[in-house]
Amino acid sequence: MPELPEVEHVKRGIQPYVVGEKINRVIFSSKVIEGKKQQRETIIKGMALDTFQTFTEGYVIDAIERRSKYIVFHLEKDGATRILISHLGMAGGFFIVNHVDDIPVENYRKHWHVIFELSNGKQLVYSDIRRFGEIRNVPSFEAYPSFLQIAPEPFDHDALNYYLACFDHKRYYDKPIKQMILDHRVISGCGNIYACEALFRAGIHPARKTQDLNHQEREMLFLYVREVLEEGIKNGGTSISDYRHADGNTGTMQLHLNVYKQKTCKVCNSMIATQVIATRNSHFCPTCQK
């Protein structure tokens, strides 16, 4: 699943081509149309397809931002505003092309689902191999309450104190620390790959209970989460399976991973162990992490 660094690079890739452009037309794939006919929320969530078109076509993309693992498009038309909120799911991606056939990766070219035809002649294409992603058109963030629960960006000034305060919440008291830092209400944008890597750098076993960590360990872990996310952005994200940039290129963070899908620990040479925690497969060094 694309995490904060990957989503940041998708945003950066499409931003120069779409900001200030009008969305002339929205086209849906047969899979999206069939899904809606069968009462399934396929990609377009929360409204009918014709309603989505009504509140999208003719609008200008004023700005794009990334919030946690979401890409947010701010739209304007004759003083009226709307917001597109998109989550890439397990294998979604946006591409800027002249035509859908120009998408350089075959799987994404084959599995396109939404085309936004822009006033500059470009197409903003949302492709999703597994169709777990989503795009919502809302009048405000208040119309999507779960979005308002997202923690501050990990690079924000108040993010550390916000995270530390979460340890006082009863919902996290008896949880594995890995489960806690994966919760976007605690740290925004930290997914499985970067959580595994941060826990390794902090020397903390992913299954340790949150209340067992002392203040220094809690603070150190957050700083390592921020560090690996920054490195992920610097290295263009992690391309292990399906993730691609908006131009089809891959990131290189996978070359710098210490435990995630690695065979041996790069510090002590012990075999990397795995354990399912909160339904996610955790990778860790049983020697270095306690």
Image (cartoon, rainbow, N blue to C red):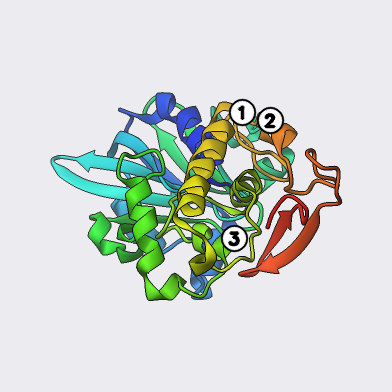
> x%, y% of residue 166?
38, 62
How far is the residue under mark 1 from the one under mark 2? Answer: 5 Å
The amino acid at mark 1 is Asn
Q: Which of the 4 image quadrants contains residue 16?
A: top left
Closer to us: 110 or 285: 285
Pointer 2 with pointer 3, Cβ within 8 A:
no
As drawn, the label of residue 116 is none
> x%, y% of residue 63?
30, 34
Residue 242 horizontal side relative to residue 236, left or right = right
Mark toward the start of the polypeptide (2 vs 3): 3
> x%, y% of residue 26?
42, 46
Crowd band around label 3 with a 10 angstrom C-alpha radius: few (<14), some (14–19), many (20+)? some
Circle 3 SS class: helix
Residue 143 horizontal side relative to residue 52, left or right = left
How far is the residue under mark 2 from the one under mark 3? Answer: 32 Å
Q: Which of the 4 image quadrants contains residue 64?
A: top left
The amino acid at mark 2 is Thr
Q: Which residue is mark 2?
A: 252
- 21 lies above or below 197: above
Which residue occupies 33% across, 61% down? 149
- 225 lies above or below 283: above
Pointer 1 with pointer 2, Cβ within 8 A:
yes
The amino acid at mark 3 is Lys
Circle 2 SS class: loop
Which residue occupies 34% across, 40% down? 156
Count the numbered circles shown.
3
How far is the residue under mark 1 from the one under mark 3? Answer: 34 Å
Q: Which residue is mark 1?
A: 235
Closer to us: 148 or 205: 205
Pair 2/3: label in front: 2
As drawn, the label of residue 31 is 3
Circle 1 SS class: loop
